[in-house]
Image (cartoon, helix red, strand yellow):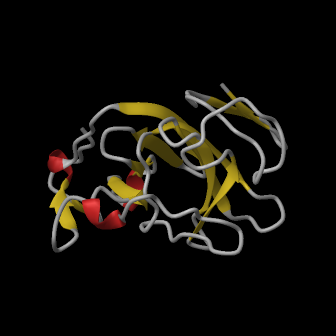
């Protein structure tokens, strides 16, 4: 639970009007976390979302869904989220977002999240400032062990990420 007595936060997942008390924030099978820019990001595997938790107490703290949605209305199969047809942050459909890494793009200063979906076998890149999500590795629902460009590579059972300045490692 995320909490700060007596305050509320905006969460586009838990309530119809968007605001719920901090003590109502719940998690369900958080899998991997990443920190960047004063925020903690958490991949919520069972809720099929990524949440941002503000670490700066002066901003009021709280949790906010930043990528994914928990509604069945997201559609099946999940959209491909290609470079030519990116998905929106809250329009992206995950089955099991398990791996997570965060970075600041040195060229644009945008916050980027890399999200590995262990069930679909793909790695998504979410640009939080541009409201865009694209697949950068793997083939949607075609697990395998093939290296190569995003339109060729196949991944299976993505579990964890490690990131350096210019390389994303996938386990």
Q: Is residue 135 above or below residue 97?
A: below
Q: Is residue 67 above or below residue 73?
A: above
- Does residue 25 appear left or right of residue 37 in this picture? left
Q: Residue at x 54, y 69 (%)?
A: 87
Q: Residue at x 46, y 59 (%)?
A: 78
Q: Is residue 142 above or below residue 70?
A: above
Task: Please provide percent x and percent y for residue 74.
Answer: 35, 64
Q: Quadrant of residue 7?
A: bottom left
- Does residue 157 appear left or right of residue 151 in this picture? left
Number of numbered tags placed on the structure image: 0
- Does residue 110 appear left or right of residue 9 in this picture? right
Q: Which one is in front, 123 or 144?
A: 144
Q: Which one is in front, 5 or 170?
A: 170
Tell me if I can see residue 10 in this picture: no
Which image quarter is the C terminus in? top right
Q: Quadrant of residue 44?
A: top left
Which image quarter is the N terminus in? top left
Task: Please provide percent x and percent y for residue 21.
Answer: 16, 56
Q: Residue at x 38, y 60 (%)?
A: 76
Q: Residue at x 78, y 48 (%)?
A: 152
Tell me if I can see residue 64 in this picture: yes
Task: Please provide percent x and percent y for residue 100.
Answer: 56, 39
Task: Please provide percent x and percent y for residue 42.
Answer: 44, 41
């Amino acid at each position: 639970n995320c909490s700060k007595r007596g305050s509320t936060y905006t969460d586009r997942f838990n309530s119809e009007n968007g605001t719920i008390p901090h003590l109502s924030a719940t998690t369900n099978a958080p899998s991997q976390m990443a920190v960047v820019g004063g925020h903690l990001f958490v991949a919520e595997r069972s809720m099929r979302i990524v949440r941002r938790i503000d670490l700066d107490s002066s901003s009021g703290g709280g949790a906010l869904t930043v990528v994914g949605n928990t509604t069945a209305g997201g559609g099946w199969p999940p959209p491909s989220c290609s470079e030519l047809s990116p998905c929106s942050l809250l329009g992206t459909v995950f089955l099991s977002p398990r791996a997570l890494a965060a970075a600041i793009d040195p060229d644009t200063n945008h916050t980027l999240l890399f999200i590995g979906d262990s069930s679909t076998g793909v790695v998504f890149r979410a640009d939080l400032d541009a409201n865009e999500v694209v697949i950068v590795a793997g083939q949607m629902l075609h697990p395998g062990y093939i290296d190569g460009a995003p339109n060729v590579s196949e991944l299976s059972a993505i579990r964890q990420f490690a990131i350096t300045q210019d390389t994303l490692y996938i386990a």
